[in-house]
Amino acid sequence: ERTRVGRIGVIGTRATIRSGAYEQAIRQAAPGVEVVSQACPLFVPIVEEGWADTPVARSIAEQYLEPLMRAKVDAVILGCTHYPLLVSTLAPVLGEGVVLIDPAEIAAGQVAEMLAGGSPAASSGPARHTFFLSDVPASFEEVGRRFLGRDLGPVERIEQTDLPWFER
């Protein structure tokens, strides 16, 4: 819906790009659209280090985004939760005519519609957040605070093998 020229860029981690999930979904929704995917693995540590608005981040963005600019995409999907924190760096590199799309905003809008429609979750009282992770909690808390603009509360470290859906 957001492309005018039929060329969409997708940026994400190596695993996300390798999965082809965004490319496949886009091609199903709009078979004639050209998709240019680019792994940008250094973006995650840049965000986690708090370097999103630095010359280092811009230099790396210029390198990673060059194939998308060469392909003349006019919409870029931010295929990683960290990437919206780089918008102020990515937008000037890509140029004025390129729309940046955050899938999390779309998902949040769909959840809001669902809750407004009387979903049982809408009447269960104030939200309680529980964070379980397999990484070092201190780093997660710092990054989470940057993402949400508030303290997260308790964070617990667990092993993946403690998760009921984890299969070896």
Image: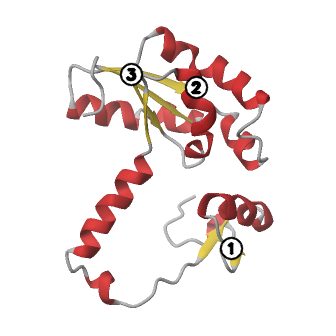
Along the viewing direction, whichever of 158 and 151 lies nearer the viewer: 151
Locate the N terminus and report the quarter of the image it occupies: top left
1 or 3: tag closer to the N-terminus:
3
Q: Nearer the viewer, mark 3 or mark 2?
A: 2
Q: Residue furthest top?
A: 70
Disc 1 packing (10 Å; few <14; some 14–19; many ≥20): few
Circle 3 — which element? loop
User: Hey, what amino acid is under mark 1?
Assistant: Asp
Residue bearing mark 3: 74
Q: Is residue 38 left or right of residue 105?
A: right
1 or 2: tag closer to the N-terminus:
2
Along the viewing direction, whichever of 101 and 161 lies nearer the viewer: 101
Residue at left 77%, top 28%? 55
- Residue 78, given in percent of the width and then of the height, sits at 49, 38
Q: Cβ–Cβ below 8 Å for labels 1 and 2? A: no
User: Hey, what amino acid is under mark 3?
Assistant: Asp
Residue bearing mark 2: 92
Give how far apart the Cα atoms at labels 1 and 2 are. Answer: 30 Å
- Residue 65, given in percent of the width and then of the height, sits at 57, 20
3 or 2: tag closer to the N-terminus:
3
Locate the C terminus and report the quarter of the image it occupies: bottom right
Disc 3 packing (10 Å; few <14; some 14–19; many ≥20): many
Along the viewing direction, whichever of 91 and 14 lies nearer the viewer: 91
Give how far apart the Cα atoms at labels 3 and 2 are. Answer: 13 Å
Q: In which quarter of the view is residue 62 placed? A: top right
Q: Is residue 39 left or right of residue 103?
A: right
Q: Taking 118 as reference, is 8 above or below it? A: above
Residue at left 28%, top 17%? 5
Q: In which quarter of the view is residue 44 placed? A: top right
Residue at left 40%, top 18%? 73
